[in-house]
Amino acid sequence: MLTIFLTESLAGQSAAVPAGPPPSGGGFFPLSQVHRGQMATAWTVFTGTNPEPMQVEILGVLRGARGPGQDMILAQLHGAKPEYTGVVAGMSGSPVYIGNKLLGSLSYRIGQFAKDPIAGITPIAQMLEVKDMPVNTQWASGSPHVAGTQTDNSLSSDGMTFQPMETPLVMSGFRPAAIRLWQKEMAGTGLDIIAAGGGSGSSKPDASGSFDAISPSAVRSIVPGSAVSAQLVRGDLEVSATCTVTYVDPEQLLACGHPILQAGTVSLPMTTAEVVETLASPLNAFKIINTGDPIGTFTEDRDSAIRGVLGVKPHMIPVHITVHGEGADRKLNIEVVDLPSLTPQAVLVSLYDALLENNQSSLETSYHVTGSVNIEGYPPSPLDLWAPAGDQGSAQLSAAMQTDQSFALLYANGARQGAIKAVELDVDSIPRRAQVELETARIDSSNIVHAGDTVLVEATVRPWQQPARNIRIPINLPPGIQPGTVRLLVSDAGTLDHALNQPRISNRTVDFETALAQAQSRHPADRIFVSLLLPDAQAGVNGQTLSTLPLSVANALEPLRTAKDVTLNGESAVVAGQAPAGGMLSGFQILNLHIEPGGGLD
């Protein structure tokens, strides 16, 4: 720590500080010339959009503090504002200059309750390594992509724990319950700390569903020290993380001085940001942010910086949600980041929030979700899910989680090559408990049957707290059915799907074609099914069910059970009839049907 005389001399030097930060082309200050006692200037936005200067006192260089060969510069901030607010979330990336030469960026802080505003500076040479990476603006989810792991980026040196300055996360348009779900899903990533703030009107889609073009004037407004935001969700809902620009040239910028998720190559919308206010707090000081106009795309999320390319539009996944109820429909049009470590969570929380914000929602509301996941090069993969109200928890959360699980089975499949083009979700809000229970089933037809006859099955179902009702389902017996006893399965969709798709022996991950086929073959949960259980072999191959197989074919498939997506069963389930159940049906019954050459039925 320098003397009081030095502190007083800093105040005398403040008048010499220029009105704005030096341009990035002014050169770089070499780390080898950094020593204790040097004075520097950092720039950051405290209010509005214009960066303001702070005096910086260099305390020394911590060798290897960021990893082998990765040094950190230790510094103390001086001036009325930093000494009042301390080190602030959203300040990471603030450029530090010695003279007009760029030294690095404020990026790290010490602990939660440090009394003095002491920060760690990422040297500019380490950040420039990210700038020099190839620019791949064609990145999309169709290519294999490895997500960043949720690691602890805190650093330890000489008994002090350094933590990256948080990137304040703004969730605009979300209800508190949806924000809590996001925090639970993102715990440990650094993106679970939510700050106050607002979204940007410029991130709303137009009437055609397209987002605004890049703003040339907004691009020109970016200087070192400007606040910028990375949007994880944009549109009618918004999730964004904000930090500060360290370096900018006509084509690209560097920001943060540390990773957001260290996800590697990414495609995130990059916008300007307005600092409404900087909130001082000994626990978590942060900048209150409004995101602004689009200026390009963040393409790299690396250990020492995030890199943004100016003027380039990002690749995102469109998600369209329509919620129907007794009143007016609610429509949400958003785009979510295409990143395995974030996309499923973004879809989950966005749909959950859409269901929470429905005026018809109550504890007794059930939900029926239909729609599709549209994948480049494939037909749309259908969604048909039910979440009845009940005593097992929130129906809104159940609907969102089931939908997200179905989406993730396709999105996260390692064999998928086509990009996700869009997710279409259509939700019916049903103002009652939608459970329907199958009570009994019986055969109600002539007592003499043979191959080719029609058999009438009558099922009694009971909707929740409503009178029981009977459903009559005619089925036609196959002309070639053999005399003897045949079992009939009267069931819900889940039981039928289990009968058609037996458990797999192989531990191999389900491939993409199988996952698509399984999604196409699922039966709707609001219907009742009658199936013949025939004494013939049945195989499941790549998600498709092959019933009544000759024994020779079944024997040929047997060796493939442990190596391929093949299942075998000695009994075939053949759907013979179905009818609407009036809600989400549960239950099954087995009936015995006796077929004799001369007739006979019981």
Image (cartoon, helix red, strand yellow):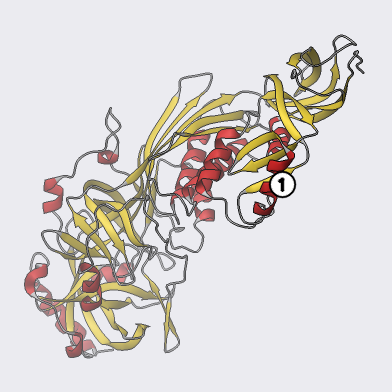
In the picture shown, does residue 386 fall above or below 444? below
Instruction: Answer with the quarter of the image where residue 398 lies.
Output: top right
* Residue 357 appears in the rendering: no
302 or 229, nearer to the observer: 302
The image quarter in which residue 434 lies? top right
Measured as percent of width and height from the top left, residue 248 is found at 15, 63
Q: What residue does disc 1 label?
A: 555
Counting from the top left corner in percent of width and height, residue 98 is at 14, 80
Q: Position of residue 520 (x, y in %)?
A: 55, 34
Q: Is residue 301 above or below residue 39?
A: above
Task: Decide: is 41 above or below 158.
Answer: above
Answer left or right for 147 relative to 228.
right
Amino acid marked by disc 1? Asn
User: Looking at the image, is 248 positioned above or below residue 320?
Assistant: below
Q: For residue 463, say whether it is visible.
A: yes
* Residue sitting nearer the eye, 217 or 207: 207
